Image (cartoon, rainbow, N blue to C red):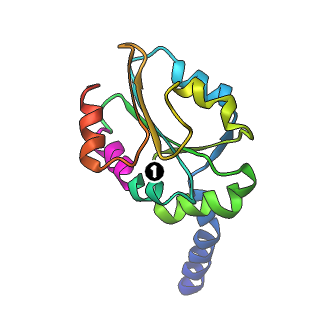
């Protein structure tokens, strides 16, 4: 009988496992813009990426390490997926789960990138990966339209801390 209970408990946990997966919210640009404009002393490290972008995928572990290394500081890592919203369940959520991403991940559901790219940064051409580091209290901003090495990412954040 104890074996049956253990088996049932194990099966229950196995079937419940997908509910432990990180939620990926689908948002529109005004919501992202509002979050990034909030006046507080948190430094936001925002990375625009996609599941189909090789350089993006290569640098994602750097953002995870940065999040972990700064967990006790007022630093927030936000990973903004540029995948189509229709790919949320087929590609984005499985990708996030497979890679074990713990940073907050949102999917930006906008059909016309030209409608928001300039609002993120006037110098952004729209290519990804693109990283924005911003602190609204200090009015500091830095942008990078390239793949960042772990050292480059850490050095960029250090200028905000």
- Neighbourhood count class around disc 1 (C-alpha, 10 Å): few under 14, some 14–19, many 20 upward: some
> Does the magenta segment cover residue 11?
no
Q: Mark 1 points at which residue?
A: 102
In x, y percent, where is residue 94?
60, 63
Q: Quadrant of the C terminus?
A: top left
Report if residue 95 is visible in the image: yes
Report if residue 45 is visible in the image: no
Residue at figure coordinates x 64%, y 62% from the top left: 91
Q: Which of 14 and 102 is in front in this view?
A: 102
Provide the residue span drawn in magenta. Answer: 61-70
Vertical position of residue 82 compared to residue 121: above or below: below
Vertical position of residue 22 compared to residue 121: above or below: below
Residue at figure coordinates x 32%, y 44% from the top left: 66
Vertical position of residue 63 compared to residue 37: above or below: below
Residue at figure coordinates x 39%, y 14% from the top left: 139
Q: Does residue 23 appear left or right of residue 75 in this picture?
A: right
Q: In which quarter of the image is the N terminus?
A: bottom right
Q: Does residue 89 appear left or right of residue 151 in this picture?
A: right
In x, y percent, where is residue 15?
65, 70
Asked where in the image residue 134 lies, by quadrant, the reply is top left
What secondary structure prevails in the magenta region?
helix
Asked where in the image residue 115 lies, by quadrant, the reply is top right
């Amino acid at each position: 009988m104890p074996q049956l209970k253990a088996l049932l408990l194990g099966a229950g946990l196995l079937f419940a496992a997908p509910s432990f997966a990180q939620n990926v919210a689908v948002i529109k640009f005004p919501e992202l813009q509002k979050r990034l404009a909030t006046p507080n002393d948190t430094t936001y490290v925002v990375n625009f990426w996609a599941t189909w972008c090789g350089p993006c995928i290569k640098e994602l572990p750097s953002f995870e390490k940065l999040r972990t290394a700064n967990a006790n500081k007022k630093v927030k890592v936000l990973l903004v997926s540029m995948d189509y919203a229709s790919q949320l369940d087929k590609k984005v959520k499985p990708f996030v789960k497979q890679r074990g991403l713990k940073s907050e991940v949102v999917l930006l559901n906008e059909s016309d990138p030209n409608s928001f790219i300039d609002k993120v940064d006037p110098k952004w051409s729209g290519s990804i990966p693109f990283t924005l580091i911003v602190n609204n209290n200090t009015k500091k901003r830095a942008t990078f339209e390239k793949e960042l090495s772990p050292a480059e990412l850490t050095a960029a954040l250090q200028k905000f801390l």
